[in-house]
Amino acid sequence: MKSFWLCLLMFLALPTMLMAQRKNKKEAEKVTVDPDSSGIVSNKLLPTTSPLLLFDEQSKKEKKKKEKKKEKKNIYYGERTKKGRIRQNLREQVQFTFFNYTTQKQTVDPYVRDIYWYDQRDKMIRSKDFDPSRGVLLHGPFERIIGEITVEKGMYYFGTKHGTWMTFDNRSVLVDKGHYQAGWRKDSRTTYYDGNNKVIEKLTPIEYDLKEGNFYHFYENGQVAVIGEYQYGEKVGLWTEYWDTKNAQAIRKREIQYQEKPFTKNFRPYIRAEWDKEGTLIYRTNIASN
């Protein structure tokens, strides 16, 4: 009799077990979806958000504004800011970081590599992956002090280094001095398709005569063609080429994997993946990047 009721219970439970197995299978399929199956990517790379090249012309305008009227308290580049401070213990010394930030909603330039923001959740300053839901952009004066010595000072413009930045050693000796314009080193090179310097062809980041930062090559219609990164004059990481879709959407054409760190010995760049003009994956290597 017991075996009868046991068989009956198993029979009744069978449909539920089969449904659970199907659900688990579907969830597993979702998890293993190949992120490279489509070459279509975010449209943030289309010309509607072309590089914000302020450079020398904008610098002159800002200088004239400063000469015409005095800056109001906590207002920088026309934007009202708030002050922040971070205190840290470093060995036997105390480090203070003083900064200003803006709560103004601002779309960050996707072409600038380093966007500095204050993570209000973790109480720290970050330079990557700005998340407006948990932090704010640095904007205005910045100063880092160890003990009683200023070791770094400069200005931020909506999360980007702007103007003159200086760093000092523990004896207040100047060890570095850089000039920026909205996140770009002023030494960076820009080439154009036209004689009026309006249609950008290439943006090459330069620091101390070496290529340093994000590189961009554009089609003549303004759509991005190639994106990559330089470190100490060397190509690093993943370089991506894009199809010219006449600004309809951004579709990857090819990805080339370079060394993750500069001056890596015995590393040969290789094609990681390729897509056709519709964004369908046509090739991918099984080589794991170093």
Image (cartoon, rainbow, N blue to C red):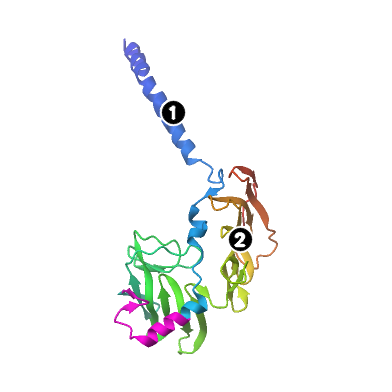
Q: Is residue 54 left or right of residue 216?
A: left
Residue at image location 58% in from the left, 66% down from the top: 199
Q: Residue placed at 45% from the left, 33% from the top? A: 26
Per the image, label 2 sits on a secondary structure element best described as loop
> Quadrant where the C terminus lies?
bottom right
Left or right of 272 on screen, residue 81? left
Q: Which residue is mark 1?
A: 22
Kind of residue indicated by mark 2: Glu
Q: Secondary structure at mark 1?
A: helix
- Residue 211 percent location from the top left of the image: 61, 72
The answer to whether residue 6 is above or below residue 236 is: above
Numbered range of the magenta stretch = 60-81
Q: Residue at x 33, y 62 (%)?
A: 121
Q: Nearer the viewer, residue 27 or 128?
A: 128
Measured in 3D between alpha carbons, the distance from the residue under mark 2 to the one under mark 1, in whole angstroms, is 51 Å
User: Residue at the top extreme?
Assistant: 1
Q: Judge by depth and name the residue closer to the eye, 264 or 183.
A: 183
Image position, residue 230 (x, y; %)? 60, 67
Q: Is residue 231 left or right of residue 103?
A: right
Say whether residue 65 is magenta.
Answer: yes
Residue 208: image location, x then y, percent: 59, 79
Q: Is residue 230 left or right of residue 9?
A: right
Q: Earlier in the sequence, mark 2 or mark 1?
A: 1
Q: Residues within 10 Å of mark 1 (few under 14, many from 20)?
A: few
Q: Nearer the viewer, residue 29 or 191?
A: 191
Tell me if residue 86 can be seen: no
Image quadrant of residue 210? bottom right
Q: Circles 2 and 1: CB distance less than 8 Å?
A: no
Query: Where does the N terminus fall, quadrant-wise?
Result: top left
Type of amino acid at the residue the image marks with label 1: Arg
Does the segment drawn in magenta span residue 73?
yes
